[in-house]
Structures are given as structure tokens and as C-alpha cells.
Image (cartoon, helix red, strand yellow):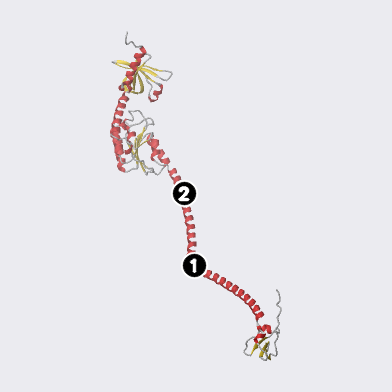
Amino acid sequence: MKNVYSVGQVNNYIKNMFTQDFMLSRIYVKGEVSNCKYHTSGHIYFSLKDETGTIACVMFAGARKGLAFRMQDGQKVVALGSVNVYERDGRYQLYAREIILEGAGLLYEKYEALKKELEEMGMFSSQFKQQIPSHIKRLGIVTAPTGAAVRDIMNISRRRNPYVQLVLYPALVQGEGAADSIVKGIRMLDEYGVDTIIVGRGGGSIEDLWAFNEEKVARAIFNCRTPVISAVGHETDVTIADYVADLRAPTPSAAAELAVADVRQVTERLSQYRYAFYGRMTGQIERATQEAKRRLLRLNYLSPENQIREKRQSLIDKEERLQLLMRSALEEKRHQMMIYVERMKGLSPLDKLSQGYSYIADESGRTVTSIDDVSEGERLKVYVTDGYIRAEVAGKEKMTWQKKKN
């Protein structure tokens, strides 16, 4: 026997076929709930049926966070999930990831279609998002005149900055005519000239929030020249308006926090700026004062008057030094002169004469220093301290004198 397969092989083959089918990986199935059982593990086992057949379904505990109601037999629902084979039993079933009531399911399909269309048109692109002003004077609000949303915005705005003017357009936010009312409110506030517009309401079902999923509302927000903050529903509710708006806030309270700057923080920041400015200015003034003093000293030093005074003082100092050097030089020369005088005294003939010495000259005045300079009978003059004596050479005799040894 050829081509014989085990049960497991067949089931695995079929499972792979289901897995490879793209349509079965994400499919919406609507029907009536039957045999619904909540297991202790948290999983939900049920079947969906209509007049033509039944399909087994399971929603695992991890996917139940998206379930907004408790399932019961007889409910008309739309389940989003994938169809696959449970190999052990050899049967296929729907593995549900999201379950909504049938009326809401139709709206959800419409929501997904519009979301995809607008996204392809680029209306969700960040390049078209406007910057929300950090400090505003007038805040526009498009919401119901009564309800928690407007009260929350008013309370938070008053607490954060009581000087911000709130301009409310009382719009319908639910039911027939709500979308047109919201569009009109956005356009009127845009023309009025507010700084920022909050468009929103409190949470609710998809039917309650549907006005904010209308294309006309999305286009009004997209074409608004004033920055728009969407604040529709609670954190888990995301509408078309949230995608188109310049900024999305999870709640109206959060929108007020984002739109209105806290005046206390602004005051504190201004105080910090003032202290920083004062410190910098003080430092600048101190540095400028020191620089001015330094330049004044330099200017005084380089001024003509100071230069003249400095030169005059320098000349006085040089004059005193010159006089001192001259006196010192004269004193030294005087001292040397006295030495020379004393030496000259020792060499002076007159001084020698006053000591008992004399010198002899002939009639012509020539000094006689040797016996060979005269002859006998020659007349001579003998000079002494107070005159000279006439003499005549009577004779002469040769003698040799002994010199003193040093």
C-alpha cells in the first residue's frame, strides 16, 4: 500500500494549509453565541452559529482584555481572529482576538475602512501636525456644555492659569447632528481667533463616540488653522479625530494639562531667569569695572602729564646722580692732586733750598753739576733761599760719592 499517512500527518498537513491561507489569518466572523463557557483558566469557549451552520471558537485569557462585555448565549457578535486546526482533535476552530456586539461590529468595520482611507491620503502624517503653543491666552473648547469633560477642563485650566480665557462652543457630541455640530464649532472658533482648540467628550461605547469617527469631523480638524488637541473618551478609546488632530490627549483633563501652561511653573522659571540674569549682570558689571580701572591706570600711566612728570623726575634723579658723580670725581682728583703736590714739594728746588741746600750756576745761568763745567778763576752764582752769592772758582778736586743702597 502506497501513500499511507498517519492521522497526525494529515492533521498537520491541513493545519499548514490553514496557516498559509492569508484570508484565514485575519477574518471577521459574525453569528449568534451558543455553548458559551468561561473556563477557570480564563479562556472562553463558545460557538458561533447562523441559519447555515456552526463554527467552534475560543478566546484565550490573554486576549480577554479587549472584551468590553460578558458573553452570553444568544448574543449577536462579530469576532476577529484566525481560523486554524487543533491537531489533537482534528477539527478547525476560530481563535478569537477581539469580540464586539454585532451593531458595533458594523461600525468598527466602517471605522477601519475610513481610517485606512484617510491614512493613505496622508491626513495622519506628522508633517501636517501643528505645534501646540506653550503659552496661550485664549483656549477654545468644542464639547457638550454640561458633563464631566467641560468641568474638568475648566477646573484644571483655572488651577493652572486663571488668566487664560476659555471660549466654549456648546456642541452636540452624541446622536443625530453631532458631527455637523462639532464641525461648526471647530470652524467658528478657528475664525474667532483662539490660540488652541480642544475637541472632545467623555468616554463611551463606539456608538456614543461615533461622531468623532465621521469623515467631516476629521476634515474639519485637518483644515483648521488653529492647533487642535483631541480629547475623546478614555485612554483605550482612539477615534479618527485622535489620528488627525495635532495632538492627542487620552482624556479631557489631560488635554487641559497639555494646552494650559502652569502659571506657577512659569513664575518659578521667570524667577530663575531673573536670578540668573542678575548674577550674570553683576558679574558683567564687576568685570567691566575691573577692566575700566585697569584701563584708567594704564591711561594715567600713558598720559602726557604723567609722562612729563615721569621724565621730570627721571631728569631730577639723573641730575642728582650726575652731581654726586661729579663731586666724587672732583674729590678723587683733589686727593690725587694733593698727592702730586706733596710729590712736587719733594722735587721743588725752592723747597730744597729752604732745607739748607743750594745750587750753582755760571754767569750765563747754566746749572753747574760737575767740576768739568767750570774752570779756575771763573765767576759763579750760588743760589740760596733768599738770593744768590757771587763766587769765584779758586780750585777744584775730583771726588766719588757713595750712593745709598735701598
* Amino acid type for the residue under numbered disc 2: Ala
Callout 1: SS: helix
How many labels, in total? 2
Q: Does residue 75 appear in this view?
A: no
Query: Would you say 399 lies left or right of 86 here?
Result: right
Circle 2 is placed at which residue position?
276
x and y, in percent, of residue 178 in the image: 30, 33
Q: CA distance from mark 1 to mark 2?
A: 44 Å
x and y, in percent, of residue 86 in the image: 36, 16
- Residue 366 sits in quarter: bottom right
The C terminus lies in which quarter of the figure? bottom right
Q: Say above or below: 29 vs 268.
A: above
- Residue 138 sits in quarter: top left
Q: Are marks 1 and 2 in contact (CB under 8 Å)?
A: no
x and y, in percent, of residue 312 in the image: 52, 70
Residues packed near mark 1 inside 10 Å, few (<14), some (14 to 19) or many (20 plus): few
Residues packed near mark 2 inside 10 Å, few (<14), some (14 to 19) or many (20 plus): few
* Amino acid type for the residue under numbered disc 1: Gln
In the image, which disc is placed on residue 307?
1
In the image, which disc is placed on residue 149?
none
- Name the residue located 41 percent from the left edge and 22 percent from the top edge: 61
The tag earlier along the polypeptide, 1 or 2, is 2
Q: Say above or below: 313 vs 291.
A: below
The N terminus lies in which quarter of the figure? top left
Name the one closer to the observer, 372 or 301.
372
- Name the residue located 35 percent from the left edge and 14 percent from the top edge: 9
Callout 2: SS: helix
